[in-house]
Image (cartoon, grey):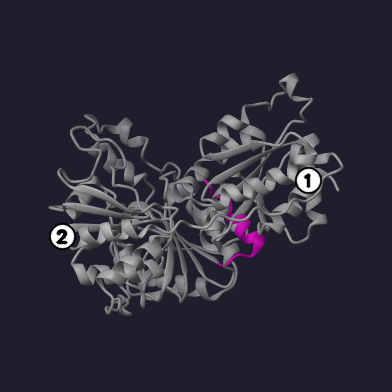
Amino acid sequence: MNGAQALIRTLVDAGVNVCFGNPGTSEMHFVAALDSVPEMRGILALFEGVVTGAADGYARMADKPAATLLHLGPGLGNGLANLHNARRARTPIVNVVGDHATYHKQFDAPLESDIEALARTVGWVKTSTSTAALAADAAEAVAAAQAGQVATLILPADVSWTEGGEPAAAVAPPVARQVDESVVRSIVDVLQSGESTVVLLGAHGTRERALRAANRIAQATGVKLFAETFPARIERGAGVPAVERLGYLAEQVTYQLTDVRNIVLAGAKSPVSFFAYPGKASDLVPDGAKVHVLAEPLDDVAFALEAVADLVAPDIEPVLQEARRPGLPSGDLTPQNWVDVIGALLPENAIIVDEANTSGLLLPMATAGAPKHDVLTLTGGAIGYGLPTAVGAAVACPDRPVICLQADGSAMYTSSALWTMAREGLNVTTVVLSNRSYAILKLELQRVGAESTGPKALDLLDLSRPDLDFVALATSMGVSGTRASTAEELADQFRAAVEQPGPSLIEAMVPTLF
């Protein structure tokens, strides 16, 4: 057994049985070893940003790591944007990054680079220096990933191809810490103080079990509940307690936290502005308010909330969202009405991957009472996440419909994910919101106080000349594509797309808000 075979066997034995990859020469022995470990599913993507985004989406839905296979430093570099999003989501990922053979590195070949330095920007990293140690290094990488990290194992080519490898036993995964009773009681005192208090939910605090406990607490104490702005995964819809998310704009958050004296963090970080703006605060905690930590993001957030709820609301049942859908709209598509089409027709048990950006501001309201569903959001702000994440979610949950709501400009970063959807026959319905503009940047141009909004500035935010044709793009990659300009067309095409197996794309001609 060579090093690559021992590595893959160790990954599979530790529960990592999907590998998204875009390999090169240094990874060929890993590629060859896939046939000797049939339990590992290898999935090819045409760009490393699709590889890493797919691993993120998979792990968010499977609650276990996926592996990636990347080619040296440049391959890892191409995947860093979506690894950044995964780091912010605390997604467990095991990157296997091929490197030159140990004896070849001294010659500074064209692809030689500092892979460890790149990998450190997103999490844990280790270079395996011998075939004998490789499998144990792999088990350590899986354990690091299971602790909520992006873990990168660097695999020199000769360590991979040398015989003498042996699989290693899996390292026991970490158990989420349960908060102390003293912490729970101190939070109860805050909640019962009579002061205006917010409980901010993040990490696993946006799953149904935690939401039920948080809702009980809110009923009993009168505190306000919010979810963090961009949760890694939030469970919502009919039969689940509803929770409002903090706004994206600092002004929205300031309004939501008006007169709040206490903020209790349950798996979330203290709120800050997404960017700095001249004359505006970066720390969004109101002046004079105190921040209290009930549970850190990697703690057992649901346990902590249930412990509080059992003290303050022992006999209270959670209030669940009623089933309620918007009516189907008519007429030309607008930023206001396209979301009602999704809310009216969202299938049961769907997974929404939301990178609609400015076009999706009204989406949470339109889908609040739709059948129970999950939503995955852009945790780190690095665009180009939607299509790859939909790939991973569909691989993790092949029996659930995946709905990717995708802004047009962001789609072009990782559009080759459509090819992987077609190749793997994934049940993904993509709705591209085509406003032919970087609309969010038009808004930000004003908000940062830039003095000029002349033609040269606006030209860098425009996606015309030529117009993008997503129907043609999808068709070229084996995905069925249609175009909708009216609400009626979008409804007909969306119904058809979710009913047929395999991937589909709808280009929805929705004008910009700005």
Q: Are marks 1 and 2 in contact (CB under 8 Å)?
A: no
Question: Which residue type does callout 2 highlight?
Answer: Ser
Question: Which residue type does callout 1 highlight?
Answer: Ala
Q: Residues within 10 Å of mark 2 (few under 14, many from 20)?
A: few
Q: In the figure, 237 relative to 147: above or below?
A: below
Query: Which quadrant of the structure image shows residue 418?
Result: bottom right
**Percent x, y of residue 251:** 20, 47
Q: Is residue 341 left or right of residue 75?
A: left
Can residue 338 be seen at all in this image of the molecule?
Answer: no
- Residue located at (87% from left, 42% from top): 163
Viewer-closest of 124 and 374: 124
Q: Is residue 366 magenta?
A: no
- Residue located at (78% from left, 25% from top): 104
Can residue 301 be seen at all in this image of the molecule?
Answer: yes
Query: Which quadrant of the structure image shows residue 458?
Result: top left
Q: Residues within 10 Å of mark 1 (few under 14, many from 20)?
A: many
Distance CA(mark 1)–CA(mark 2): 59 Å
**Percent x, y of residue 268:** 35, 52
Q: Which mark is residue 193?
A: 2
Range of the magenta residues?
413-427
Q: Which residue is mark 1?
A: 4
